């Protein structure tokens, strides 16, 4: 026999559980034998204040065979805990799956789309988060996919840069140019003059790229036809020249200020067909500023001055942007590019 209150095993002759005091219950429908009346206390209710004597036998005047079969409910604690856990799991599952059908009072929408770029065909993922109001208790975040037109910037590209170096007066080996904008950057720790001249494969001069005296850092952009070229270097110390052919460079928005020292190539910047340039120069020699197209072609000579200078001009009839500037100076300078 098992106690229905605590699961303690009972002896057949015990009327109640010695652990918790629960009185044994009879099976439903089973005949019940009356308690013996020989004991005057048999009909009295149990006194909860007095300890119960579990060893007290049943009334000996009642045959054991005549006594109704008495069994205890077979409910164990592990079964009770398992039932409680199952109920909790059902409740949690109901809340979780029920949220998908609930109607939120405020909706937060997360859009994650991948749209091909209209310029390069590249796929650029874009994530947009929009929130309307404050989510109420129990509100759900719904994921939706909304097509969004995305224009990806074109990545910079072009042939691999070329590095040439040497000491003193030299001629370089041949190098190839694919055609279009080509940028030359020179450096020399010279004491005397430093000059770099460009020649094609046939030996025809394409012009002096840059020149200076003493320690020199210079750069220039030039529209060069496709082909093979070499450089003639005039120097009295170690020198390096880099050759690059940039493509698909993004221009900076205007107004924008460029500044530097000596001969420099700067840009690009975005502008329409007309742009204003405000320039200042501190030097003793010429001050020349060219506006170049994205292909390196000279679109306008904005300034052609000498010595110290401060002034403005408007470059007109421009096309083929974004644009670059070639600045030729022997001092420090600054140029503000803005809308006219």
Image (cartoon, grey):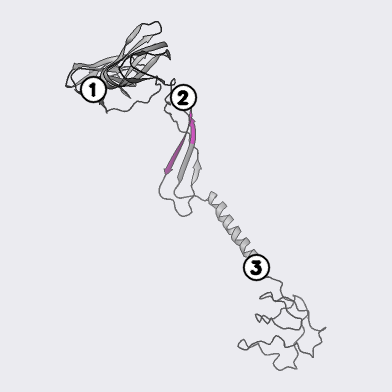
Side (left or right) of 160 relative to 324:
right
Q: Is residue 142 left or right of residue 86?
A: left
Q: Which residues are magenta?
A: 113-136
x and y percentages locating residue 67 in the rendered image: 79, 83
Viewer-proximal residue, 177 or 14?
177
Q: Circle 1 — which element?
A: strand
| Mark closest to the chain's N terminus, 1 or 3 | 3
> Up-down: is 50 above or below 202?
below
Residue at which label 3 appears: 80
Marking on residue 120: 2
Vertical position of residue 317 compared to residue 22: above or below: above
Mark 2 surroundings within 10 Å by alpha-carbon count, few (fewer than 14), some (14 through 19), many (20 or more): few
Element marked by disc 2: loop
Tell me, yes or no, whether the highlighted magenta stretch contains residue 126. yes
Going by the image, does 29 lie left or right of 94? Answer: right
Q: Quadrant of residue 227?
A: top left
| Marks 2 and 1, the one that precedes in the sequence | 2
- At a point 63% along the width and 61% down the height, the residue shown is 86
């Amino acid at each position: 026999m098992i106690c229905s209150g605590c699961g303690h095993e009972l002896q057949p002759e015990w009327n109640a559980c010695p652990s918790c005091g629960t009185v044994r219950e009879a099976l439903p429908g089973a005949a019940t034998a009356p308690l013996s009346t020989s004991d005057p206390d048999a009909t009295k209710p149990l006194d909860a204040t007095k300890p119960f004597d579990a060893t007290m036998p049943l009334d000996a005047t009642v045959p054991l065979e005549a006594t109704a079969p008495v069994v205890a409910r077979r409910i164990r604690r592990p079964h009770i805990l398992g039932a409680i856990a199952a109920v909790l799991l059902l409740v949690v599952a109901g809340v979780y799956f029920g949220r998908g059908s609930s109607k939120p009072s405020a909706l937060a929408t997360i859009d994650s789309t991948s749209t091909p770029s209209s310029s390069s065909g590249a796929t650029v993922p874009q994530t947009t988060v929009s929130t309307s109001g404050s989510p109420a208790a129990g509100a759900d975040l719904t994921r939706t996919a909304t097509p969004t037109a995305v224009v990806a910037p074109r990545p910079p590209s072009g042939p691999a840069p070329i590095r040439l170096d040497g000491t003193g007066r030299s001629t370089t080996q041949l190098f190839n140019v694919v055609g279009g904008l080509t940028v030359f950057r020179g450096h020399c720790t010279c004491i005397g003059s430093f000059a770099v001249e460009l020649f094609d494969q046939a030996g025809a001069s394409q012009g002096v790229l840059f020149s200076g005296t003493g320690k020199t850092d210079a750069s220039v952009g030039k529209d060069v036809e496709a082909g093979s070229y070499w450089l003639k270097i005039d120097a009295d110390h170690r020198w390096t020249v880099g050759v690059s052919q940039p493509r698909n460079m993004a221009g900076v928005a205007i107004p924008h200020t460029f500044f530097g020292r000596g001969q420099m190539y700067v840009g690009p910047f975005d502008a329409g067909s007309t742009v204003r340039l405000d320039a200042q120069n501190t030097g003793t020699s010429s001050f020349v500023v060219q506006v170049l197209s994205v292909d390196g072609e000279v679109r306008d000579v904005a300034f052609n001055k000498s010595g110290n200078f401060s002034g403005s001009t408007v470059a007109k009839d421009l096309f083929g942007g974004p644009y670059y500037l070639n600045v030729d100076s022997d001092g420090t300078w600054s140029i503000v590019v803005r809308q006219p």
